[in-house]
Image (spheres, rainbow, N blue to C red):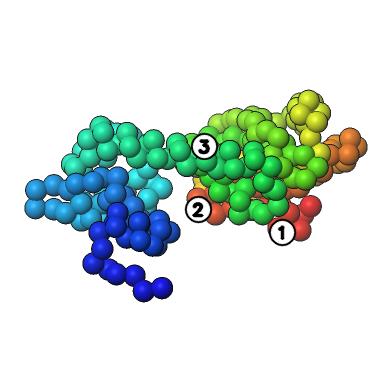
Amino acid sequence: MIIENSLLPREKLLHYGSRVLTDVELLAIFYRVGLPGKSVLNLAQEHLIAAGSLQKLLDMPFNEIQAWGGVGLSKYASLQAALELGKRYLNQTLKNNVPMNHVSKVVDYLNLQLRNLDHEVIVGLFLDTKNGLIASAELARGGLSSTQLYPRTLIKQALNYNAAGLIVAHNHPSGDPTPSQADKTLTNALKKLLEQIEIRLLDHIILGNACYFSFAEKGYL
């Protein structure tokens, strides 16, 4: 497919779809206008460079991004609304009986929920017999380096949801998703307990900074 580079971002989107747009072009559509002597594309590019990435830009509080100029409350609100729409879209997609049989799909969903937290959070994805999502729930949260999850409490929740399968996930605020010995011990304990009540532990996923560790992918489950 040959794309005309002379098209403005909105025209490009309408002609070829949103997937062909760069981060700068997508951001420019939300900004709509630039500043005197600075095009909206240049403004969007400056902000992305200053933030370091699109993800970091979207996670910034209003007072920080406002200090750069060119972004008022209206633009900021539009960006945050778009981010929330993305979260809800993924959540509803997963709950629409879409099989949770691809790690990438689960990671995309979890990243929206857990990224950039400065404390650990453990979540559980409770699945039916076809690996469709019944419910997701926060199971525990802790400090910067640790959290506590009581396996029997988790099993009680799984039974309440009448779940046939479970995916457990948590974040590592350090950014390194390498499992600790405690993570391995917890995974083994959960697997044994769940097997006793015929619930499958499909995976334990640890989220890092733009990376993840999957116990299932690495052959631990």
In the rendered image of this protein, does residue 2 appear above or below residue 17? Answer: below
Local crowd at mark 2 within 10 Å, few (<14), some, or many (≥20)?
few
Identify the mark at residue 111; answer none if there is no mark: none
Asked whether residue 46 appears in the rendered view, the answer is no
Measuring from the top left, give residue 114's x and y in whole percent.
53, 39
> Is residue 3 rendered to the left or right of residue 124?
left
User: What residue does disc 3 label?
Assistant: 88
Measuring from the top left, give residue 131's x and y in whole percent.
74, 45
Tell me which residue sits at (40%, 58%) in the image: 17
Measuring from the top left, give residue 96's x and y in whole percent.
65, 40
Tell me which residue sits at (17%, 48%) in the image: 34
> Marks 2 and 3, how far apart in space?
21 Å
Q: Along the line of sight, which residue is nearer the eye, 57 or 13? A: 13
User: What residue does disc 1 label?
Assistant: 218
> Marks 3 and 1, how far apart in space?
30 Å
Of labels 2 and 3, the one closer to you: 3
Q: Of label 3 and label 1, which has the lower sequence position?
A: 3
Q: Of label 2 and label 1, which has the lower sequence position?
A: 2
Q: Which residue type carries mark 3?
A: Arg
Q: Do callouts 2 and 3 mark residues in contact (Cβ within 8 Å)?
A: no
User: What residue does disc 2 label?
Assistant: 210
Asked whether residue 71 appears in the rendered view, the answer is yes
Q: Which residue type carries mark 2?
A: Ala
Of labels 3 and 1, the one closer to you: 3
Q: Do callouts 2 and 1 mark residues in contact (Cβ within 8 Å)?
A: no
Measuring from the top left, give residue 11's x and y in whole percent.
29, 57
Q: Secondary structure at mark 2?
A: loop
